[in-house]
Amino acid sequence: MAGAAETARDEASERLDAVIVGAGFGGLYALYKMRELGLRARVFEAGDGVGGTWYWNRYPGARCDVESMQYSYQFSDELAQEWEWSERYAAQPEILRYLEHVADRFELRRDIRFETRVERAHWDEERGLWRIGTDRGDELSARFCIMATGCLSSTNTPDFDGVEDFEGDSYHTGQWPHEGVDFAGKRVGVIGTGSSGIQSIPLIAREALHLTVFQRTPNYSVPAHNAPLDPDKQAHIKENYARYREQSRATPFGLVNPPNESAAMDATPEERRAEYEMRWAEGGLGFMMSFVDMLVSRESNDTAAEFIRGKIRETVEDPELAEALCPDTVVGCKRLCVDTDYWETYNRDDVRLVDLRKNPIERLTRRGLRAGGEEYELDAIVFATGFDAMTGALLRIDIRGVGGRTLADKWDAGPVTYLGLMTAGFPNLFTITGPGSPSVLSNMVPSIEQHVDFIGDFLTHMQERGAARVDPEPDAEAAWVAHVNEVGDATLFPTCNSWYLGANIPGKPRVFMPYLGFLAYCEKCDEVAANDYAGFSLR
Ligand code: FAD
Ligand code: N01
């Protein structure tokens, strides 16, 4: 029986068909889809605008590393045809403008509440709905809850001693001030050499009086060779968009880069060099397609690693510095970075590298940072220290499923999902690009669209079947998790301390979270749908 408090809450709360959390690529398309199905939906977004990743990450040099013509929606051909990308890899302001255009074009904003953080989502078993609470005091209920909260939206700032002592300015790349930052005349420190660090370091170096880069693990990076998009090339792709997009669906990462089907160890050293040189000259993530066994054979991977180290040694003039920048991990085991002038930046005499493996950070001080016994005086510190990826944004919400069980409790030993779309015991709660889906190991826009389309079709199926509640079957979930692990374990991914494994966050369970194989995944989802949504239990 419902208690008086719940009855009162019911009267006070607004009833929706679906609540969507997040207004990035995922949340915007989810809202469009819910409307298309005739459902009443509302989006809650913590930021004061749309864009998600592209709203928050405004650091110098932020741009996509999947080519613009591929890193965009496919659901509307009119949208695809009318939007003109200016560069091979669009910069953050342009991608943000694109998403703002999408929000305006499809009149999405009227159903989005900005500057509102969802704090809690509790499943009400008796009424078969989610009760949602926000930091603005909203109380709502909805039959479905769609978490489009992002894989890389929950920033990680390491808990260095003395953070509060530092009297200069500090910034996180993932929460960059909207008004920009003027580094002119400043001594700047950047901590972190992942994609965000590698994109921003060359530009900060040009602007600042002096830059110190604090590097813990050297990283691999390939050149972007970014350039204005040739209008003829753009027009040609647009004429053949459907085929172009189909091609991307048929590749392991959802990218239109022809994979080389031969193994590196079957090629001669000259053939390998020629292939790597070709990919290097082409630029971008296509480098990972050089050989089919790059992510499964250490011997093969070592040839790619040595090739990149050779490029670093050729570019960085000081041999000792070049060695300090040379990675010794597996190429692609942490996401491969794509840069413009990254290695060249270390030839500047106003840039210094501090190798944290030899000289660990001891603490922040009033005037800067102390590492390896030396104090570095800094006017500003940039934390390019990444994210609590894949699960962070979800677990920051108090999510409770059947019997009041928290998601944090269920995922105590690592995330457990069926297809990365749902987790058993949390009925009617969907995750867009959740752990266990290709997500961050794919071109994410098509991955997001595939998830939203699957959910849309599924809701239609439920309606046709007269079902109001869906929950994955625990056996299907366990089998999927085992499969995700098996695929991950057959690769070199578990060999380094990446955020794919949660290894960047102290105390986070070490589990390989994404599913490797966009094509295999899409086929699996199609098969599940064709088999009456096998593995999902409907009521
Ligand atoms: P997001 O864009 O992260 O949006 C999630 C939104 O949810 C955020 O705005 C957040 O504020 C909101 N939110 C979270 N929790 C709450 C809450 N409790 N209440 C209210 N709102 C909440 N992927 C690629 O495939 N190619 C690329 O080139 C590429 N480049 C990238 C560059 C950067 C700098 C980063 C950080 C990521 C990049 N990615 C790239 C990954 C990128 O995150 C995805 O491509 C995509 O933008 C994710 O969209 P999303 O809607 O799923 O999540
Ligand atoms: O974060 P990261 P990111 N002390 O986690 C270091 C996407 N993205 O924001 O490797 C000292 O990769 C850490 O060192 P280590 C893309 O998917 C894409 O750069 O853990 N250092 C590392 O060097 C990407 O993978 C683009 O030893 C510490 C860095 O900080 C993902 O987002 C651009 C530390 C963090 O690197 C995340 O990228 C930007 C500590 N305590 C982002 N803690 C494109 O190019 C962490 N570090 C499209």
Image (spheres, rainbow, N blue to C red):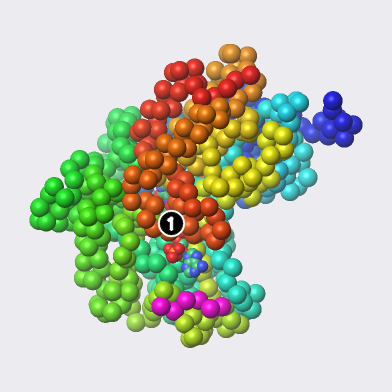
Quadrant into which the N terminus falls: top right
Q: Is residue 352 left or right of residue 425?
A: left
Q: Which residues are magenta?
A: 358-363
Q: Which residue is mark 1?
A: 498
Q: Is the CB of mark 1 within 8 Å of ligand 2? A: yes
224 magenta-colored: no
**Percent position of residue 250, x then y:** 31, 33
Give the answer, above or below, for where 105 lies relative to 46: above
**Percent position of residue 68, x then y:** 37, 45
Residue occupying the far bottom of the picture: 374
Q: Is residue 17 left or right of residue 505?
A: right
* Image-quadrant location for residue 336: bottom left
Residue at image point 27% right, 36% down: 236
Residue at image point 43% right, 59% down: 497
**Percent position of residue 32, x then y:** 55, 31
* Image-quadrant location for residue 240: top left
Residue at image point 22% right, 47% down: 291
Residue 223 seen in the figure: yes
Quadrant into which the C terminus falls: top right
Q: How many marks?
A: 1
Residue 118 seen in the figure: no
Residue at image point 68% right, 27% down: 143
361 magenta-colored: yes
Residue occupying the far right of the picture: 4
**Percent position of residue 448, x then y:** 47, 37
* Image-quadrant location for residue 9: top right
> Which amino acid, by three-letter code, is at mark 1?
Ser
- The foreground one among 361 and 150 is 361
- The foreground one among 407 and 75 is 407
Give the answer, above or below, for where 199 lies relative to 465: below
Element marked by disc 1: loop
